[in-house]
Image (tube, helix red, strand yellow):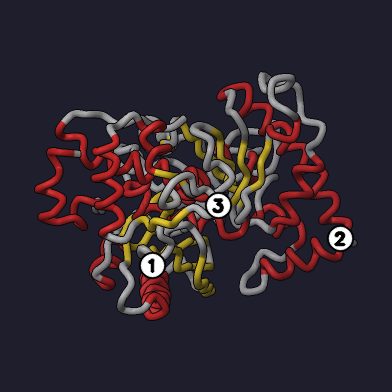
Amino acid sequence: MVSRGTTQQSSAPFNRRIVLDVIRRQGRISRREIVELVSLSPQTVANITNDLEAIGLIVARRIKGARVRGQPPIAFELNPNAGHSIGISLEPGRVKAGLVNLVGEILERRELDVDTHDQRRALASMVALIGELRRRAGKSGRLWGVGVALPGPLIKTDISFVGPTVLEGWSDVSVLDELRDATRLQVFYSVDSAAAALGETLFGVARTLDSFFYMHFGLGLGGTLVVNRAAHRGANGNATEIGHIPAVPGGKACYCGNVGCLERYLSLQSLAEALEVSELPDRDARIVAALERNADARLQSWCAQAADRLRDAVCVIENILDPLTIVIGGSAPKLLVERLVAGAQPLHHSVRGGVAAPTSRILLSERQEDSSIVGAAVLPIYDLLSPRFEVLQQDRRAEPDVAGLLGQRGAARAGRL
Ligand SMILES: [Zn+2]
């Protein structure tokens, strides 16, 4: 669904986001088509596209072969080089970072093993990676800010910062204030599943979907419900932590204090334990090697069991939430996720069965291992590119907006938009 503009005077920033949003979603679109889709006057749309072009957020291109009379019509696109954002994915034992452009492409990627039990070391690693990526971005490019995605829950609860799949030993994320001070950049953060889900809505398989469920398959297992392109947070910002849903009565002990949690069967940590490769530094490489060989009986037995848990989880999620689809991303190797999804077929009967095509009930992220990096990088630019104001309210530390870039020109024009 395309959002529509409004003619209220205070709506200039909102209308700009609406127009940017429609350009991003369509990829390439003419001014006349924008007018039709967003219900703003041609003059208002012209003012907005002129402003957005003047500050370099969009570029105009002549449409080849569409000449009717005189000049060929012009189409607008997001300008990929309108600035960069740095996305950091922080998982136990590892920091990954990427320099991402305004259309969600990772231009440069870095990865470091680090003892994340020690917040100072984690901070130093993040600062070092940001420094390298900034140099790569160069002095000329605009840097929207830094986004950090971390395994949740981040708000203090019974199950926060407990166990090997989260940042064990941390008590809060105030270290990110120091990251902002050390880099003098705007720093945003979010639970990894929420960040990655928003990344999928802007640049991924969910870019045409307003609502869906996102399952984050990393070292642990998380989830985010996206409703009207906003992450559903719940009462305390901790909604849909599906990893700790009881899945197997009397099952494996979980670090949260319960038994049989879903994450104990469906996560990279669970697989690493089964293969006895839990320790860094080469945990992930050994998992990938085992997957490619596919000769390990422990691997095959784990996959069969994990696929059963996935089938059950899909049924629970569908019956509770009736999502249009379930998108699976995270840091797990694509090969593994594909194998589990194939093993979970046929899916259980549910409220989606017979409604959605079997192949559309689960979609795989196109970025799989890098969903968290792109998701994190989206945090500083999500407000810019989406008309949803309240999306990141709970997590954000600062607010970028086109109005600031427009400066006096924008202020003078605001009443007319
Ligand atoms: Zn648990």
How far separated are the C-alphas under marks 2 and 1? 37 Å
Q: Which residue is mark 1?
A: 119
Q: Quadrant of residue 306?
A: top right
Q: Position of residue 336 (x, y in %)?
A: 74, 54
Q: Earlier in the sequence, mark 2 or mark 3?
A: 3
Q: Secondary structure at mark 2?
A: loop
The earlier-in-sequence mark between 2 and 1 is 1
Above or below: residue 14 compared with residue 399: above
Q: Nearer the viewer, residue 46 or 401?
A: 46
For this view, does 339 lie left or right of residue 209? right
* Placement of 96 over or under 342, stated as above or below: below
Number of the label disc, if any, that sits on residue 153: none
User: Alpha carbon of mark 1 to alpha carbon of mark 3: how far?
Assistant: 57 Å
Report the disc number at residue 65.
3
Which residue does the numbered mark 2 point to in the structure image?
A: 294
Q: Is residue 350 visible?
A: yes
Residue at horizontal 51 percent and vertical 74 percent from the top: 110
Q: Nearer the viewer, residue 189 or 22?
A: 22
Q: Quadrant of residue 124?
A: bottom left
Rendered image quadrant of residue 4: top left
237 relative position to 285: left or right: left
Q: Amino acid at mark 2?
A: Asn
Helix, strand or loop for disc 3: loop
Q: Position of residue 74 (x, y in %)?
A: 41, 51
Q: Is residue 97 above or below residue 37?
A: below
Q: Is residue 269 left or right of residue 382?
A: right
Q: Are marks 2 and 3 in contact (CB under 8 Å)?
A: no
Q: Residue type at mark 1: give it.
A: Gln
Q: Nearer the viewer, mark 2 or mark 3?
A: 3
Q: Tell me which label, 1 or 3, sits earlier in the chain.
A: 3
Which amino acid is tagged 3?
A: Gly
